Image (cartoon, helix red, strand yellow):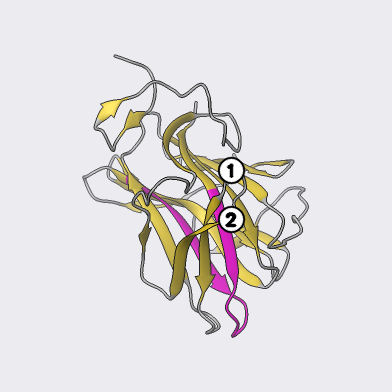
Amino acid sequence: MATGAPDWQGLAWKVETTNRPRQVWPSGRVVWTYDFETPWRGINVASGTISFDVVAGYGNSGGNSLKLESASVAGTTGTVYRHFGPVASGKYGLEVTYAVNTGMRNLRFGFQVVSNSILSDGYIDIMPASATIKYYDSDGNWTTLPGTWDFPLPDIYIWQRLKLTLDVTTGKYTRLLLDNQSVDMTSLALKTAAGGVIPRSRAEITIAPDTGTARTVYIDDVTVTEEE
């Protein structure tokens, strides 16, 4: 059998891409990637008040990016997501680059995975309005990320990069990479519960404003990986 991550769009195995000019970090085999330079490729919008569009002329590594804008109603949220097949190793990575308003309350990245009849949720919350980073803990609460880290200065004109990795076979987070920082998360458990019998997984990005003002984030270089 060929090595590499399963290509769930073509229902075939593909060999790891060796040339990833738009990569955020080089780790992991590419399962799905999108730089918003080609026609729309199946990112979906969940319930919530959010506007989205691929905009030209403002991208991190190319000419385009995904613009997400929240509603002007405080407390509202909106999510974009991408379904893909589960990876054999059970180790997932989500890479993005982003540029965000300072007043955005929540900017969440993560996964929901069903494997071996267990539902696992793992998310990180970048909170520009309060300069805080939280993770979704095993009790389903948002808890301040432990360890030593500096909050990256949010700026709609500065592109930042993030990668979150987790392992559903152990039920644990693995690592958060944020700009030049690396935060060990191996002691932190995912939220787990009984799940369905059909394996499935999806990557999600959720935004919410802090006040009754619309807030914007630009997203580029989205990549889902199977980690070693």
Nearest the viewer among 195 and 90 is 90
Q: Dot 1 surroundings within 10 Å: few (below 14), some, or many (20 or more)?
A: many
Nearest the viewer among 148 and 106 is 106
Element type where label 2 sits in the image: loop
Report the amino acid beneath label 1: Lys
Instruction: Report the magenta stretch's main SS.
Output: strand
Residue placed at 71% from the left, 59% from the top? 157
Q: Report, in whole angstroms, how far the alpha carbon at label 1 lies from the one at label 2.
A: 24 Å
Residue 83 is at least partly visible in this image: yes
Is residue 148 inside the magenta stretch?
no
Residue placed at 71% from the left, 44% from the top? 179
Q: Dot 2 surroundings within 10 Å: few (below 14), some, or many (20 or more)?
A: few
User: Badge 1 is on which residue?
Assistant: 163
Report whether 225 appears left or right of 100: left
Q: Quadrant of the N terminus?
A: top left
Residue 137 is at least partly visible in this image: no
Residue range in magenta is: 201-220
Establish if 78 lies above or below 222.
below
Q: Position of residue 168 (x, y in %)?
A: 42, 40
User: Badge 2 is on which residue?
Assistant: 57
**Sequence-earlier tag: 1 or 2:** 2
Q: Quadrant of residue 26?
A: top right
Residue placed at 67% from the left, 50% from the top? 160
Q: Position of residue 49 (x, y in %)?
A: 43, 76
